[in-house]
Amino acid sequence: MYNNDTIAALATPPGIGALAIIRISGENLQVLFHKLTQNKAIKDRFATFSSIYCPNTQEALDSGIIIYFKAPNSFTGEDLIEINCHGGEYISKSILSSLYAYNIRPANPGEFSFRAFMNGKIDLIQAEAISELISSKSTRAAKNNLNNINGYVSNYVDKLRNDIINLLSIIEHELDFTEDEIEQTRYDKLADELYKIDSAISKIVNTSAMGKMLSSGARVVLFGPPNAGKSSLFNAILGFDRAIVSDVSGTTRDVVEAWFELSGIPVCLIDTAGYWDSNNYLESMGIERTKQQVMLADIVLFIDIKDPVQTFSQLNLDLDEDKLLFIRSKSDLNNDFTSPDPDIISISTKNNEGIASLLNILSVKLSSTFGSHSSLDPIIVSKRQRHLLLEAQNISNKALSLTGNNIETDILASVLHGLNDTLSEVIGNISNTEVVNNIFSEFCVGK
Amino acid sequence: MGEINPIIIAGGGHAGIEAALAISRMGCRAVIITLDPKSIGRMSCNPAIGGLAKGHIVKEIDALGGIMGRAADFSGIQFKTLNKSKGRAVWSPRAQVDKLKYTRFIQNEISLDENISIIEGEVVDFAVNNSNISTVILKDRSAHPCASLIITAGTFLNGLIHIGTRKFRAGRMGEKPAIGLTESLINKGFTVGRLKTGTPPRLLRSSIDWEQTLLAPGDETPVPFSINSIDKFNPINEPCHIVNTNTGVHRHLKENLHKSAMLSGQIKGVGPRYCPSVEDKIVRFASRESHQLFLEPEWANSNQIYVNGFSTSMPESIQKLALMQIPAMKNVEFIRPGYAIEYDYFPSSQLKSTLETKAIDGLFLAGQINGTSGYEEAAAQGLMAGINAASKLNSLNPFVLLRSSSYIGVLIDDLITKTIDEPYRMFTSRAEHRLSLRPDTAPLRLTELGLKYGLITPKQRVLFNKFKIEVEQTKLFLKSTKSSLFSKTNEPLQKTILKNTVTISQIQMAHTELQNHTHQALFTAETDIKYQGYVDIENRRISQFNKIENIKIPKTINYNKLVSMSAESIIKLERVRPETLGQATRIAGVRASDIYILSMAIKQSGDCFT
């Protein structure tokens, strides 16, 4: 996959739009620039307005802004040309075809980012953040991914690695000399350092729940007997905040989902209307589907007209109580019902009462579930990073278990090397090229 | 079918003798050509064998049937395992030896060996036929046909001794240098470099006030280097004597640093971990107010005392003045001052992993001539070159050790891959597989391979098999035997060992099944158990990163055709011409993306192979 032939692709989504961007990356693109513009002067990183010509036939294809980025100061680290042309399928296609006829190859998915990575312009964490940014589902998610593009997580991991390497240098140095030749570090000092490293790893590993949620969103499921007002509540919540990010109708699953943003967090609200038999609470055909949603949920909003706590307990469902919020609906009809349980939230969609406070409570609950982190904390997002950092945590625990009365520094050195290697992999120092290939092949074309 | 020519070895030092003996064990004939037959096996410097990482190498040489370990066991006057306060993978055996006994042992074995003959002379040139070596030419103009030539000339090639500002040609103090061979090699296209190494003064025993020295005895239960010595090992235990330098000593040295040939000379940057000279030590560890010096007799009852830790190339007067600051040395007299020796060496990027030169078939270089320092490093190379020269004659596969199998493997791989700017010395930190390369497991790692190549005597084979079986039996016993003697619950003894609440000796005393097992076998079994978990992790980690380690790079590759690669990396790869992708990753400055390109090229077997 890594060549340095010239590649080109559409960087914007195909379809109709005002503008499209075509990206070309390769070595020494000056000649190409001249061919594309009929010899306009090249000004590095300068937006030039020009007609765009077919490099072979010199037929005029479009006119727009063309920018030349001289290596290494470009996204990929090679020469890069960006053509901002008119949107619409035909124009961008004709420009691309003319480029391909000029011996330029169509880029593979993720290939621009791959070259950026290979040329050391970005590390793997940043590469993954770029990909994540494009699919961010909320403002907080976007902010977090931007932070990671700017190196928040990378810096954190790098600092950690430096601490480990410093510790390793001391240990390795001492292993090469006998006790008579140099001063040997005291064991309690070594243990202190290890403990600090371990805490730092735990800290970032613990952000992954939040990261996962920012990336995939929190799943909030509406559950309860028929006519409890689930669908009304569904609409009320969505109507409350108009920033819907995406709308998925699940025909195969017979559930209705919609995304909304709650305090910057992407939430997928799921309505399980239709799987509750008035006689047997859970109709057998739909039982699995509803159960699945409820089990997969991060939060379950259990709604009942009368006493949600009691109704729920009759179901004998083995569900983590921490996930549940109990809601008594249609409070406008039940004025004289006083619940012994202060945690039941009363709402009336008809009168628009209680919805705001429900959303507040929901927001607080989500924060406590996923850990509260400020927007300045590094938060890890990708599964790959999480997996490696968990491994690092494992190794770090092992290192800590070695400290005691007699630290065998040869074993400790080996364990710390393993820790360092694992953290390097997070940033992307991987000599296993297949792994790297796999990561980038999941990016989209033009990225 | 004519008679097969012998393998000629130029030089009778530690490298040369291991080569000769290995060649003989493999059934071929060896001829040692030496300037002085009486100097065969001579120890030029430290009267000690082994030490940190070096002890590991000696065990490995022994595991392949070499002589160094047996010679040290025979002539040792004090045995000590260093680094005992650290983990077992870095326990390093060391012996102070009687130099005369050591040399005698070696010369005796060589003289009794029918396959080895000695010629007194000096190799100055050699003839090549179709890029195959054919004849060795001596200074007296005689020509000797050979199957292979192994050059183990040590520090003799254009050797130049420096004492302060005095310079004179010598191979070692008191011995002539070798002139001419370097020039012949240069004429045949080899590149040569210069290195310097230092040695301490020799003091007159009677001039030292021994009452003012500290006594340091050897281990109470000494452990031999060689598996052959297991049964009858009862060495003497001469205590070693220690003195400490002090601020007075350091001041004298500091004030005269500019007079040190080593520090004022050509070496640009002294490496971070090497302490070749005492002046170097006081600069690097400036905050330390004193360093230990070991006073070692060169042989039993000898008058010559070697000052270990005081390697120097200061002028003689300064050396003396500095040492006189030590109370025990108020009236010290020198037999010989310390000196630095400068000598030719050949960058090992010119060698294959068999130590055969890439340019000329049948020509091998081994030992200090490759830029290493230390008897043990030299002996290991001599052993490997000898085995490979004989393997060629016996039509066996090349004998190459992996980094994961031995320190010898690490040594050779480092030599042929890295650039050397100061004498290369082995450290345990050079081995990424350190936990797997424990000194006590050397036989288990190497002897079976040695058996395949005919390197192991019948006697050693028996001892090895006994050791191997006892280790396996012990491990099996510990795994399958449950006991609550040493733990609260009834659990396999293996588990109790992992908890560190019992030693193997305690277990041996309580179970008759282990009664007759040797201490070494029990030790190895116990350590294997303790280390297994970490070794597994280490191996997994390393193999993940080294999926590419053993991928061979086709010999026909033309790096210039890899257009995506940076020009610098192409130059580096062309210079080293690594044999495997793993070796390529260790070349300084070669980047991950270059390895990527290279591995893709190999997979696609494109047109860069012409």
Image (cartoon, coloured by chain):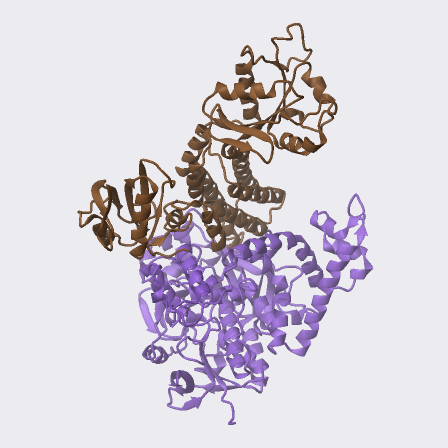
Measured as percent of width and height from the top left, residue B229 is found at 66, 70
Q: Nearer the viewer, residue B225 or B341?
A: B225
Numbered label tally: 0
Residue B201 visible, this angle = no
User: Where does the image place residue A290, in percent across and percent down from the top left?
Assistant: 65, 30
Q: In the rendering, what colour is chain B?
A: purple
**Residue sticking out furthest to the top:** A336
Q: Could you tell me residue A345's position as x and y percent?
A: 61, 15
A344 on left or right of A73 = right
Name the residue furthest bottom.
B2
Measured along the vertical axis of the image, is residue B163 above or below residue A180? Answer: below
Horizontal placement of B259 versus A35: left or right?
Answer: right
**Residue A222 drawn at (x, y percent):** 61, 24
Q: Quadrant of the C terminus of chain A?
A: top left
The residue depicted at 66 percent of the width and 74 percent of the height is B460
Q: Is residue B342 above or below residue A404?
A: below
Q: Residue at x 56, y 17 (%)?
A: A358
Q: Name chain A's colour.
A: brown
Q: Is residue B521 in view?
A: yes
Quadrant of res A88: top left
Q: Quadrant of the N terminus of chain A?
A: bottom left
Please say if A162 is above or below A27: above
Foreground of the two, A237 or B88 = A237
Front residue (pair B475, B337): B475
